[in-house]
Amino acid sequence: MPKLPLPPLPPSFRPRPQRPGEGNGKTSPLDAAAEAGTTAVDWIDERTSLTMGARWLMFRKVPKGTNWYYTLGSATLFAFLNQAVTGVFLAMYYDPSPTRAYESARYITNEAFLGEFVRGMHKWGSSVMVILIFLHMARTFFFGAYKYPRELNCGATTLSRFYAIHMLLIPGAIAALIGAHLYLVAKLGTTAPPWLRAEVDEELIEERA
């Protein structure tokens, strides 16, 4: 199967040739470091061909008429990465236990370095991500980006699958959890108010003795 040629590098990414007599044969430490880095990258790329995939992904032909609406997908990805990164940092301090959850959240907000900022980014980032997802889906629908040959990205079967998940899978899981909860309530009984003491049967005390 013939391979498609890689798109050419933009002129701004191509190395600038030196003019005759430029530098007079002397190289600065900065140029030497840049040359060493380029040599190392070329050595790795010659054996792994990693830049081929990067060039194929980043340097593509863009049709005319593109505008800011086409950046909603990238913005959604950025919002997701924001949630992932801030979530990792919050997980380092948050303690999801009944006795420590509130105190750990208070510590993050009031005492941890940049804790209030990271928590705010995670809190508002979730809302921003939901809004961006809806805008991205709306752009896909109104611009016809779900048509051939992009059915795998947004085919019509996606709607039916999400409908089936919404109508069958999620309600089924919720019904199973409700059933388990009711079973435990019936088996273990309800809890008495904490200010009332349970009456002790004297016959049971005599039997234990």
Image (cartoon, rainbow, N blue to C red):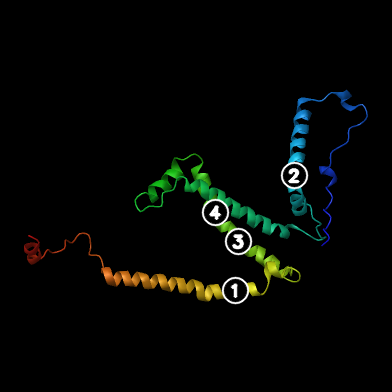
Instruction: Check disc 1 and report its element: helix, strand or loop.
Output: helix
Front label number (1 vs 2): 2
User: Which numbered disc flags the more N-terminal residue, 3 or 2?
Assistant: 2
Residue at label 3? 131
Task: Name the residue: 39% across, 51% down.
Answer: 101
The amino acid marked with disc number 1 is: Arg
Q: Residue at x 62, y 62 (%)?
A: 133
State how far apart marks 3 and 2 are (Cα).
43 Å
Examine the rendering and report whether any part of residue 120 can be seen: no
Residue type marked 4 = Trp
Does label 4 or label 1 sit earlier along the sequence?
4
Q: Residue at point 85% right, 45% down?
A: 11
Closer to the camera: disc 3 or disc 2? 2
Q: Are marks 1 and 2 in contact (CB under 8 Å)?
A: no
Mark 4 or mark 2, which is nearer the start of the sequence? 2
| Real-space CA distance between mark 1 and mark 2, rounded to the nearest whole angstrom | 43 Å
- Location of mark 4 (residue): 124
Position of the C terminus by quadrant: bottom left
Residue at disc 3, secondary structure: helix
